[in-house]
Image (tube, rainbow, N blue to C red):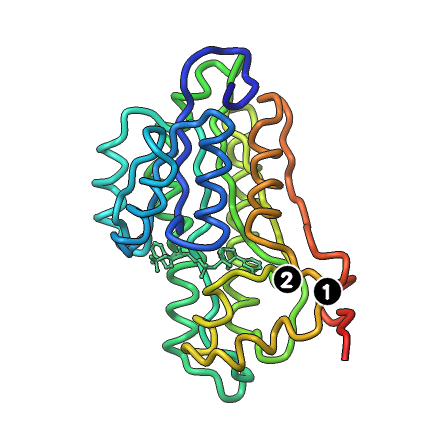
């Protein structure tokens, strides 16, 4: 039963960035947990493929989370929402602050910060309604930030700034919603090897992307993070996992990574 909320009704989870990586794995996992899942991303073919694979519990919705008008229309089309997983995001470029392209910084802010803002604002009424009086339920807003939100690293300035923004949204929102039947969860993963994240960061340069994970014994997988997400959103509704940092064992800190030669 989805959500362990002592109810028989089917719960609905909206997962952004569900066309690849952590989002796709999360949609699969939440469907397996009994949620009806709504998969959101820009690439129609990709989300339709993932939704088809999941089966009847999944629907695909093409949506750019940075498009506030489109997000509002999407929210109006939903009959209920219990869980919002704000996963869409990414890094663009790895230049120093001195050399960074402001266009990359703007895009990172738009998807990682404003995307979370648009989706959360638009779905909050439905999440509040899903929580009812809070006696036996809670809407859930989940924000995928990153360990980058807490620890700067060379070449990471724009991404560090954007994920710090996502962290700020989660923390502020939790304070503002206290007493209401909506919980706010933040998941901050360290190194996760997904097919596209590093490729996107390096503009499709496969060698540079591969070097991120070179010699690292078992980076986290998308499924590891999906497992973490599923655990947090299926806790009883009075339990709020505020912030969960999850890293591979081989990464003790942002700069402390065990690599085999
Ligand atoms: N991989 C890591 O090491 C790592 C570590 C910590 C945190 N994270 C965070 O975890 C999240 C998922 O990362 P990932 O590794 O799974 O990366 P990924 O495979 O590149 O996935 C990013 C997803 O976001 C979607 N997306 C991007 N811009 C969008 C937009 N404007 N509107 C809607 N969807 C959009 C992409 O789909 P479309 O292109 O089809 O829109 C894609 O499905 C990101 O927020 C990332 O910053 C990743």
Q: Nearer the viewer, residue 99 or 48?
A: 48
Name the spot of residue 93 as percent of width and height, x first: 47, 78
Most extreme residue toward the front is 53
Residue placed under numbered mark 2 in the picture: 191
Answer left or right for 259 relative to 139.
Answer: right
The residue carrying pointer 2 sits among few (fewer than 14), some (14 to 19) or many (20 or more) residues within 10 Å by Cα, namely many
Would the CB of label 1 be found within 8 Å of ligand 1? no
Q: How many marks?
A: 2
Q: Which mark is residue 217?
A: 1
> How far from the left and from the top, in percent, is residue 160?
57, 67
Give neighbour class at mark 1: few <14, some 14-19, many 20+ (Cα, 10 Å): some
- Using the image as rendered, state which of residue 176 and residue 30 is in the foreground: 30
Say which of marks 1 and 2 sits in front. Answer: 1
Q: CA distance from mark 1 to mark 2?
A: 11 Å
In the picture provided, is 137 more to the left or to the right than 80? Answer: right
Q: Which corner quadrant of the image does residue 163 belong to?
A: bottom right
Mark 2 vs ligand 1: CB below 8 Å: yes
Q: Residue at x 77, y 75 (%)?
A: 260
Task: Identify which residue is drawn at 57% across, 27% down.
Answer: 234
Q: Does residue 216 sit above or below 171 in this rendering?
A: below
Nearest to the observer: residue 203 or residue 90:
203
Above or below 32: residue 148:
below
Q: Quadrant of the C terminus?
A: bottom right
Secondary element under disc 1, as helix, strand or loop, is loop
Furthest-bottom residue in this view: 99
Give the left or right position of residue 78, taking residue 32 as reference. Answer: left
Residue 29: x and y in percent read 50, 37
Image spot of residue 114 (x, y percent): 39, 55
Q: Earlier in the sequence, mark 1 or mark 2?
A: 2
Q: If the picture is divided into quarters, which one holds ligand 1? A: bottom left
Secondary structure of residue under mark 2: loop
């Amino acid at each position: 039963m989805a959500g362990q909320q002592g109810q028989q009704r089917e719960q609905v989870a909206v997962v952004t960035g569900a066309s690849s990586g952590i989002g796709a794995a999360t949609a699969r996992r939440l469907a397996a947990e009994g949620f009806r899942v709504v998969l959101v991303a820009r690439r129609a073919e990709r989300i339709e493929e993932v939704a088809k694979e999941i089966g009847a519990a999944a629907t695909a919705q093409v949506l750019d989370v940075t498009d506030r008008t489109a997000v509002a229309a999407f929210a109006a089309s939903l009959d209920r929402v219990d869980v919002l997983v704000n996963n869409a995001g990414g890094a663009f470029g790895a230049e120093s602050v001195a050399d960074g392209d402001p266009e990359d910084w703007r895009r990172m802010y738009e998807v990682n910060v404003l995307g979370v803002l648009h989706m959360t604002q638009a779905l909050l009424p439905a999440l509040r309604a899903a929580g009812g009086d809070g006696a036996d339920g809670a809407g859930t807003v989940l924000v995928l930030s990153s360990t980058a939100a807490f620890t700067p690293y060379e070449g990471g300035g724009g991404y560090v700034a954007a994920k710090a923004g996502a962290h700020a949204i989660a923390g502020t929102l939790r304070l503002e919603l206290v007493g209401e039947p909506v919980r706010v969860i933040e998941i901050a993963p360290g190194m996760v090897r997904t097919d596209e994240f590093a490729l996107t960061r390096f503009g499709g340069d496969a060698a540079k992307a591969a070097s991120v994970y070179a010699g690292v014994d078992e980076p986290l997988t998308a499924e590891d993070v999906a497992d973490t997400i599923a655990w947090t959103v299926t806790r009883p509704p009075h339990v709020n996992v505020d912030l969960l940092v999850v890293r591979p064992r081989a990464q003790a800190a942002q700069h402390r990574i065990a690599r085999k030669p």
